[in-house]
Amino acid sequence: MSSYLAGAPAYRGAWAAVAYTFAGSGVMFGCWASRIPDVKADLDLSAGALGLALLGAAVGSLLSLPLGGAAAVRFGSPRTTRVAYLAMSVLAMLPGLAPDGVVLFVALLLWGAAMGACDVAMNIQAVSVERHFGRASMSGFHAMMSLGALLGAGLGSLGAAWSLPVAVNLGLVAAVLLIGFGVLARGFVPDPVAGGESPPLFARPSGRLIAVGAVAFIVLITEGAMADWSAVYLREDLDAPAGLAGLGFAAFSAAMTLGRLAGDRVVTWWGTRRLLQTLTALAAFGLGAGLVSGSSIGAVAGFAVLGLGLSATFPVLVSDAGSGRHPGAAIAAVTTCGYVGFLVGPPALGALAELVGLRSALGVLPVLLVVACGLTFLAAGRQLTPRAPAGPGEPGRAR
């Protein structure tokens, strides 16, 4: 991160504002995820009932991603990010206050909607920072979210150890984060505008945008599969001990975080297209080799290589989507494609595993990653050149 600290004060302030927003979102999600078992026990929910309730967050996020993008286009990403982050913080306590599974679904629907809107708005603001200062930053921002999720999981675990009610735990974390956000959010920068024209609220599908969205879909299918199925594969298919089964996802996550921390420098050296081609090919090789190895150690090593391959891929795709004339609508479209894959892919792989076995079902993913590698040839590499902010009264200026 020394390269960031060596920059101009304006860039440092903008980078800190967006990085804090990404990290704060990760902290809140990580804290919630670590308290899900307590919610299940408090409400006496079965695994099936809990699964249905948890769908609320997914549905809320998917509904709000395009709407959050439209709001960012209409009102500017600085204002939209502030409002969405505030809503996400205020609503954080709701899941812990739910008295039953139905209310929990509704609470997560509302909170998920706020998280989805914040997600797309902060990604648009991240691209604005890149274009405003001409520096690759997106991968580092997503690394901050990964680190925030780890911190949040730790805070949630401490809350559970101290027998804090879930609502209190989430509320305290959100309140402290909101104070820092109120100070740092002043560093947000105006969104760039294209010749003073009014940008569309939603992106029209084009050849390049469809290709970028398809790659994002495949990448997040694979990421979601690692979260849901890596430990199951190690434990049930490879007979790994219980202690080793969790190392697959741990290795994947650690490699992904490290790759994201280095991603901005690499994309600056190599360019978008070359980096995407290399990373998707590396991901396909890592997962394929891990599955072919047929051993626990080989699978864990393969998952680590996969994590490195996927590390900067989605952040760079988002940044590439924002390189056109109307970044807000394009980013909303690509993030929606990606999160549909993240949510729909793992259950689909589970259904396929019932027919052909989990190893064969996971074997579909390296093939899809090879397809993604081919699709990256259709993505135009972006040039990070500073753009002047919008003038007073122009669309996209900071509000």
Image: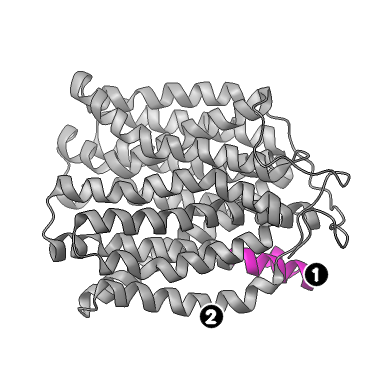
- Give the residue at the far top of this rendering: 356
Q: Position of residue 322 (x, y in %)?
A: 70, 43
Which is nearer the eye, 234 or 54?
Answer: 54
Q: In the drawing, does residue 299 fall left or right of residue 111?
A: left
Residue appearing at x 38%, y 28% in the figure: 289
Q: How many marks?
A: 2
Which is nearer the eye, 320 or 200?
Answer: 200
Q: In the drawing, does residue 45 fall left or right of residue 63?
A: left
- C-alpha gap between disc 1 and disc 2: 25 Å
Q: In the drawing, does residue 260 fall left or right of residue 110?
A: right
| Region of the chain picked out in magenta, as a range | 1-19
Query: Which disc is residue 296 wearing?
Result: none
Q: In the drawing, does residue 48 fall left or right of residue 228?
A: left
Residue 153 appears in view: no
Query: Which disc is residue 179 wearing?
Result: 2
Q: Position of residue 253 (x, y in %)?
A: 40, 50
Which is nearer the eye, 265 or 102?
Answer: 102
Q: Which residue is mark 1?
A: 8
Residue 362 appears in which quarter of the rendering?
Answer: top left
Q: How is the image coloured?
A: one colour
What main secondary structure does the magenta stretch of the protein show? helix
* Amino acid type shown at disc 2: Ile
Residue appearing at x 60%, y 66% in the figure: 82
